[in-house]
Image (tube, grey):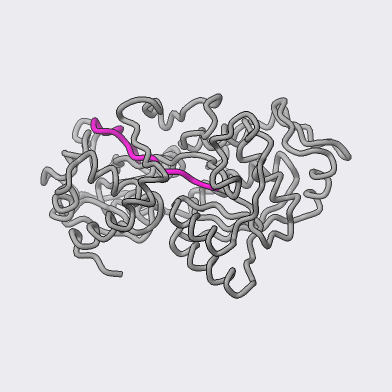
Amino acid sequence: MAPFTSAKKRFATKAISAALILSAYAVMAHGATPAAGGALVIEGETIADSATYQQARQETLRLYTGYVQSAEKILIDRFTKDTGIKISMIRLTPNQLAERVLSEQGAGKLGADVIRTSDYPIAQAMQRAGVWQKYLPPIIADIPELSLDQGLFNLTFDSVYSIGYNTQLVDKASAPTSWADMVSGKWKNKIGIVQGGSGGSTAALNRFMLSKLGEDYFKKYASQDPVIYNSLGQEAIALARGEVAVGTVKVSDIGVLATKDKAPLMFVVPTEGVAVYDYYLGMTSSAKNVAAAKVFINYNLSKRGQEVFSKLGEYPARADVASPTVLGVTLPPIKSAQYFRMSTEDSMKYSKDDLAKWNTDFNFTK
């Protein structure tokens, strides 16, 4: 392992231009037929009928999202290029997003047409507050399991939590290969993590660690004196800058940032497996741009939209779209033992207690 105190080539986040990221991750637009007056058809799939599509082109969609901003922007840019529909985005961490949504909903001033969040208990809290409006995208007729809570919101993709490292500080031969390695003492004071209550990502990781790695794993991890960040995005940038050498990371963050000569990042698939967590998308009960909302939701679940997520390093919700390969590494098949997905039932059952244990074991207070 290269010395942690060695000179580090600083990573400037502003140097990663949207054009560079898009050039690395764009899905070619072949097959889109947004002809004037016609339906929207992409890769042989009808995304919207003529009336819905033509109305949507007159609207600007308002999206509230808990997804990582850089990745969401790639999806938005691809969507706008394919459809001509513009989007106004507000991005917050899932917990912050929930606070805003519930506050606006309570005041009768919810500003979103559609919301993307990663945490099932959060989506449920929004349901209880009357945030969602039932909408069943056409694909649900063929894949009904993508629709949750009687069509109030839909599963769009699964993000992957794994271990990443800075390649200027850690060579491939020395990189951690397991979750056990992360608590061996080798990486003490060199680890970055995200606080356990940041959203669906950490809820899934918490359950994975406790159920697969042992009830004492939090304490073992805390004893490594990690740097605790508020969000995955903050941690990924810190890892890229060399502020920490290794960390628990979202694979798609590493893939987006690790463009040539820009971010010195790589990830591993730990021997014990990876934790994945759901992202949900739904229309709000107060949506003003309903046609645009329908087209956006349909697009997310279309083959084109699912291919964009796969290119970003996310597991597509549709089985007919290939699992992701990121930086030359193919992620474990969904049915493999290395794939851990917390069910919605377990999310409701364990998340609150898992977080309480995380806060106690890490001696963490906001």
Residue 242 image point, x, y percent: 29, 51
Q: Is residue 278 above or below residue 194?
A: above
Q: Is residue 270 magenta?
A: yes
Q: Is residue 307 left or right of residue 199?
A: right
Q: Quadrant of residue 44?
A: top right
Which residue is located at x 24 percent, y 44 percent?
209
Q: Is residue 54 magenta?
A: no
Q: What stretch of residues is rendered in magenta? A: 265-280
Residue 362 image point, x, y percent: 20, 60
Q: Is residue 167 left or right of residue 74?
A: left
Residue 159 image point, x, y percent: 43, 41
Which residue is located at x 69 percent, y 27 percent?
43
Q: In which quadrant is the N terminus drawn?
A: top left
Residue 66 image point, x, y percent: 49, 55
- Is residue 18 visible to us here? no
Which residue is located at x 28 percent, y 53 percent?
193
Q: In which quadrant is the C terminus drawn?
A: bottom left
Residue farthest to the left? 185
Q: Is residue 287 left or right of residue 352?
A: right
Q: Quadrant of residue 171?
A: top left
- Is residue 352 visible to us here? yes
* Front-lying residue, 29 or 59: 59
Q: Main secondary structure of the magenta part?
A: strand
Which residue is located at x 37 percent, y 38 percent?
341
* Front-lying residue, 285 or 161: 285
